[in-house]
Each structure stands twice: as C-alpha cells, then as structure tokens.
Amino acid sequence: MPMAVLARNWWVFVMRGLLALLFGLIAILAPGATMLSLVLLFAAYAFADGIFAIASAVRAARAHERWGLLVLEGVVNMLAALAALAWPGLTVLVFVTLLGVWALISGGLLLAASFKVEHDHGRWWMLLGALASIVYGGLLLLAPVLGALVLAWWLGAYALVFGIAMLVLGFHLRARFRGVALA
C-alpha cells in the first residue's frame, strides 16, 4: 500500500498539530506582546514545523515514495524562520508581508501535496490545513496595516484551525495504520 508510510508516521502530523495549537493559544491569549516577541515566536514555530514536514517527507522517501512537496514546504518554513530571526527589527508591515507570503506558499505547497494523498488517508483534513494557510496569507496581504493585536488574533485563529486539521489528520492516519498493521 503506497500510503502505508504516511499512516505509520501519523505522529508527525499530531506533533505539527500540537505545536500549532500551542502557538495559536499563546497568540490569542497574549496579544499585548511586542512584535519582537511575536517575530521570535513565529520563527520558532515555523522552524519546528519545517523540521516536522521534512521528517515526514524523509520517512516517505526511505520507502521510495515521492514527497518532495513536503520537503519544499519544510524548507520554505525554515527559511521564513531564519529571515524573521535575521531582521528582528522589521516594521510590522514588513513582518505582516513576510508572514502572508509564507502562509500562501506553505499553504499552496500543502494544497498540492493533499492531492497526492488518498481520500481514506485524510486528504480533506490536509486540504483544510492548506486552505486555512492560503486564506490567512491572503487576509494578511490585503490588510497589512492592521495593528499587532489583530495580527496576533489572526495568527492565533489560523494556527488553531491548522492545528486541529493536522491533529485530526494524524489521528485519522493512526486509525488507518492500526487497520493496516492488523491486516
């Protein structure tokens, strides 16, 4: 079964979901944090998410499956994190633009990857995470002058939706893995 490796590594998606939920809650509950702390928090999240995306792709590659889009998504996430760390004094407008572009690219790559996942392996949950990224990125680029408070709330809402999608996907894959392992 070509998706068996994805199902075996269900926990990677659960970790991505948990990190996104944690990040989202912090962003919503502490909106008064300075933009510098938000930039650093985003950088840590994007870097960790990139590592988990690459980890899932590497595991699939070991089984001779093609998951180049997940590798590319992971690299984009890590590059966005490094850019945020390199210029912490960026203005809110520049940071919002960076975040919006990151969300659009990451969401687009995840969207493309979702069409390679079979329906019974949770395609719709991966698609939901991708669409959340694309909508969030588009909103940021359409209204970049909104304050840090609104940015934190948007970022938190996006991370919660994405986190829930990745958690459901991970547990859906876990159920598939248990079904595959018992067969």
Image (tube, helix red, strand yellow):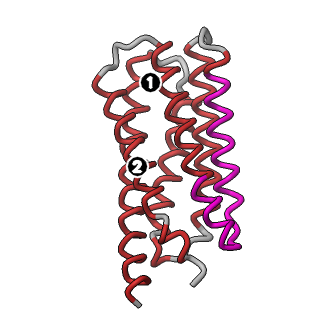
Q: Residue 39: horizontal and vertical position, in percent?
A: 52, 20
Q: Amino acid type of disc 1?
A: Leu
Q: Quadrant of residue 125?
A: bottom left
80 in magenta = yes
Using the image, tell me which numbered label, if any, was put on residue 173. Answer: none
Residue 84 to residue 156: above or below = above
Quadrant where the N terminus sits is: bottom right
Q: Is residue 76 left or right of residue 33?
A: right
**Farthest residue, direction bottom:** 183
The one nearer the camera, 1 or 134, is 1
Residue stretch rendered in magenta on the structure = 55-84
Above or below residue 169? Residue 162 is above
Residue in view at x 68 percent, y 53 percent:
71
- The disc placed on residue 17 is 2
Q: Is residue 164 above or below residue 115?
A: above
For label 1, the residue is 151
Query: Which one is in front in this view, the residue at disc 2 or the one at disc 1?
Result: 2
Q: Position of residue 47 (x, y in %)?
A: 57, 36
Q: What amino acid is at disc 2? A: Gly
Q: Is residue 51 magenta?
A: no
Q: Residues within 10 Å of mark 2 (few under 14, many from 20)?
A: many
Identified at 64% across, 36% down, the residue is 78
The residue sitting at 47% across, 25% down in the picture is 41
Which corner quadrant of the image does residue 115 belong to? bottom right
Q: Secondary structure at mark 1?
A: helix
User: Which sits in the foreground, 167 or 111?
Assistant: 167
Choose the circle earlier in sequence order: 2 or 1. Answer: 2
